[in-house]
Image (tube, rainbow, N blue to C red):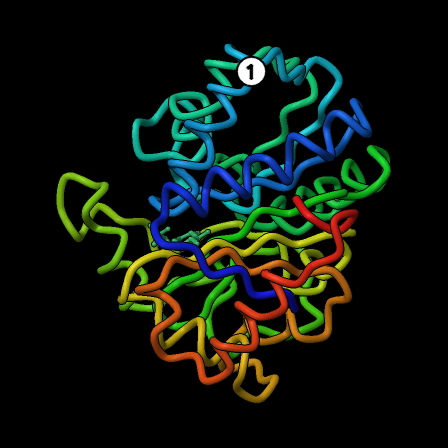
Amino acid sequence: MEVIIQSSREVSSKLAARNIANLIRRKPDAVLGLATGSTPLPLYAELIRLHREEGLDFGKVTTFNLDEYLGLAPSHPCSYNHFMWTHLFGHINVNPSRVFVPSGLVEGTAIEKYCERYEEEMRRAGGIDLQVLGVGGDGHIGFNEPGSSLASRTRIKTLTARTRADNAQYFVNADAVPHHVITMGVGTILEAREVNLLAFGEGKAAAVAAAVEGPVTASVPASILQMHPRTKVFADEAAATKLVRTEYYHWVYDNKPDWQRI
Ligand code: GLP
């Protein structure tokens, strides 16, 4: 894991955006795995700026989102589909036929087959080149709550009370937060060629410390990223306060060979 600590979420997000832009310029038909939540918002704002001002071309890019609430139509203002069109897709030249967000409208026994097809689409696209992740305060990635199998695939999950409470701010009231979701599995996420986990603010400090320096355990799903060969953690100083090897992470970043710089 490469831990990159920057002074603020804005500086950190600009760096993460440059990392994605470098990939797209190197590989115009790159496949991106994308996340929702407040964390990636400054990253998406910067990608939009790069598209508008520096001509970053998303025309051949394919995207797969991590997760979606079950029961919400794509047009629902709290759906992750709506979130992605509002905060990113609506402002760049992505081809809608190359945009994949799990459907919130599948039901019952059809869900399992649907999830298999979502994984099949990922394989058909050539697999994910770079997966963007946020992290829940409890260490979840996507909607893989603590206890999720570290080998899990895309499937239905039940949200914890804590995640429902954390995400209630986006809904009219706490009861409106769905109980069930579709999420890529931990095993699915691990297949991405590169993972960029973003974490900002002191509310994420414990999750970051557990994920980066704690034991690998299903109790902290993000900790499995220690087993991933190409993971970068973009954190601001507040999210890095509980890390022990901070000095070393800065040392590594400051002494990078030029060819490895973002
Ligand atoms: C939700 C999303 C995750 C996200 C997490 C943290 O659970 N499914 O992908 O990482 O929230 O949200 P935030 O970035 O708003 O802190």
- Observer able to see residue 96: no
Q: Position of residue 82 (x, y in %)?
A: 40, 26
Q: Position of residue 33 (x, y in %)?
A: 64, 41
Give the total number of marks visible in the rendering: 1
- Observer able to see residue 105: yes
Where, quadrant-wise, is the N terminus in this rendering?
bottom right
Classify residue 88 as left or right of residue 192. left
Q: Residue at 56% across / 71% down in the picture?
A: 249
Looking at the image, is 36 positioned above or below residue 134?
Answer: above
Q: Residue at 72% across / 52% down in the picture?
A: 194
Looking at the image, is 39 positioned above or below residue 50?
Answer: below
The image quadrant of residue 153 is: bottom right
Asked which secondary structure carries label 1, the reply is helix
Looking at the image, is 235 positioned above or below residue 34?
Answer: below
Q: Residue at 70% across / 13% down in the picture?
A: 59
Residue placed under numbered mark 1 in the picture:
51
Query: Residue at the left extreme?
Result: 173
**Disc 1 crowd, CA 10 A, few/some/many (<14, 14-19, 20+):** some
The image quadrant of residue 95 is: top right
Where, quadrant-wise, is the C terminus in this rendering?
top right
- Ligand 1 closer than 8 Å to the CB at disc 1? no
Looking at the image, is 42 positioned above or below residue 95?
Answer: below
Query: Residue at the bottom extreme?
Result: 215
Q: Nearer the viewer, residue 49 or 68?
A: 49
Q: Nearer the viewer, residue 172 or 193?
A: 193
Q: Position of residue 240 (x, y in %)?
A: 39, 69
Q: Position of residue 141 (x, y in %)?
A: 51, 61
Q: Residue at 63% across / 68% down in the picture?
A: 252
Q: Amino acid at mark 1?
A: His
